[in-house]
Image: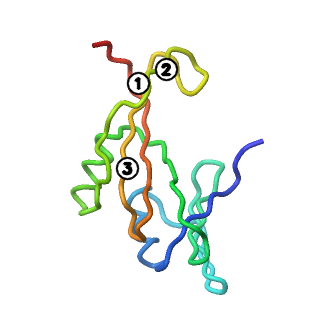
Amino acid sequence: MHIVQVAQHADDLDRAAAFYTQLLGEEPAARFRSPDLLFFNLGTTRLLLQPDAPSTVVYLLVDDVAHAVAAARDRGVEIVDDPHVIYTHVDDSLGPVDTDEWQAFIRDSEGNTVGLVSHEPRHDP
């Protein structure tokens, strides 16, 4: 079993389309006007943006959280929480073994918090 779709609130689908196209580096997979629905493919999971969806925190795996946050900051995106290590994976139960899990949070165009996550080689103090 796996997650097929995650819904996220968006008041303005044109604005959300521009924001997520820039963040994800790809165009929407589909757009419907009645009802208003906007889809992006995230691997095998669809991100659905729609006015009637509740706000939630979506966590996106990126190659490098620090780089993703710097690029977002350069575009004027609000940074909610700067990159930081949240966990060191000593086994593979929650992520790749011997990696540090980095996380940061940004605000999307619709006011939702978006988590950015990456797994970096482990750095011992």
Q: Residue at x 66, y 49 (%)?
A: 44
Q: Residue at x 49, y 47 (%)?
A: 60
The answer to whether 113 appears left or right of 80 in the picture is right
Residue holding disc 3: 105
Q: Regarding mark 1 in the picture, which secondary structure is present there? A: strand
Label 3 neighbourhood size at 10 Å, few (<14), some (14-19), many (20+)? many
The three-letter amino acid code for the residue at tag 1 is Asp
Q: Are marks 3 and 1 in contact (CB under 8 Å)?
A: no
Label 1 neighbourhood size at 10 Å, few (<14), some (14-19), many (20+)? many
* The one of 113 and 33 positioned closer to us in this rendering: 113
Q: Regarding mark 2 in the picture, which secondary structure is present there? A: strand
The three-letter amino acid code for the residue at tag 2 is His
User: Between disc 3 and disc 1, whose residue precedes?
Assistant: 1
C-alpha gap between disc 2 and disc 1? 6 Å
Q: Are marks 3 and 2 in contact (CB under 8 Å)?
A: no
- Residue 10, position as x, y percentages in the image: 50, 73
Label 2 neighbourhood size at 10 Å, few (<14), some (14-19), many (20+)? some
C-alpha gap between disc 3 and disc 2? 20 Å
Mark number displayed over residue 100: 1
**Which residue is situated farthest in the left direction here?**
74
Mark number displayed over residue 89: 2
Q: How many marks?
A: 3
- Residue 9, position as x, y percentages in the image: 54, 70
The answer to whether 63 appears left or right of 30 in the picture is left
